Image: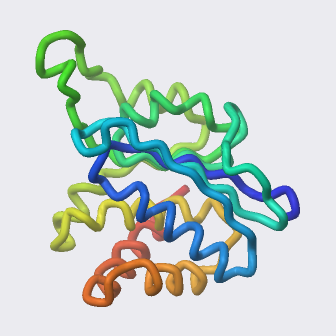
Amino acid sequence: MAEGHSILLCGVGGQGILLAAKIIGAAAEASGLSVVANETHGMAQRGGSVKAQVKIGVGVGSPLVLEGTADVLAALEHTEALRNAHYLRPDGLAVVSRHSIVPVTTTSGKAKYPEDIEARLRRVFNRLVYFDCESKAVEMGNPKLENTILVGMLSRGLPLEEGAWREAIGRCVKPQFVEANLAAFAFGRSLEK
């Protein structure tokens, strides 16, 4: 894996994109790989777009993921997946949560939220895993597990052993939430890619 792998995570402020990036980096480090990452916050505190870019491999350099080069695009909000689709390479894996967060521009009447999101996603992404991570997280007892379900989904698109992911969750999540996050990760990993 000398060339490395690039991952673009996107969503809305407060969804846990930065924790997801931290878990990916820790899993790569547990596998003996180098990690570089960066993040863009937008208006994260007010529900604005958030992006994190992570590169893992041997001797990876810049954390910037160029357009058309990401191996995996992971989105916790489905319109954010569409907004960032240009980062994914043509045969890359898109894992997307079926979650709508309607922006202020829509609620104020200045824009219209698309009604045909799933059809658009299926047209744009050749390899798509599309699942309602939010509802599953609520069913599991904690809506904040949505991001860990997504990490489980994207984990199948990267060459890291399951043990490295489990170790990373143990390192990155508060002790009282580790077991719930491990269960959320295992569920996400079990979904088809």
Number of numbered labels in the structure image: 0
Image quadrant where residue 109 sits? top left
Picture coordinates of residue 75 (x, y %)? 43, 46
The answer to whether residue 6 is left or right of residue 84 is right
Q: Residue at x 47, y 67 (%)?
A: 152
Picture coordinates of residue 25 (x, y %)? 59, 68
**167 and 138: which is toward the camera:** 167
Q: Residue at x 25, y 64 (%)?
A: 144
Q: Which residue is drawn at 37% across and 79% down?
A: 173
The answer to whether residue 65 is left or right of residue 106 is right
**167 and 115: which is toward the camera:** 167
Picture coordinates of residue 146 (x, y %)? 31, 61
Q: In which quarter of the image is the C terminus?
A: bottom right
Does residue 4 appear in the picture of this structure?
yes
Image height of 167 relative to 19, above or below: below
Q: Which colour scheme is used?
A: rainbow
The answer to whether residue 91 is left or right of residue 74 is right
Image quadrant where residue 124 sits? top right
**33 and 118: which is toward the camera:** 33
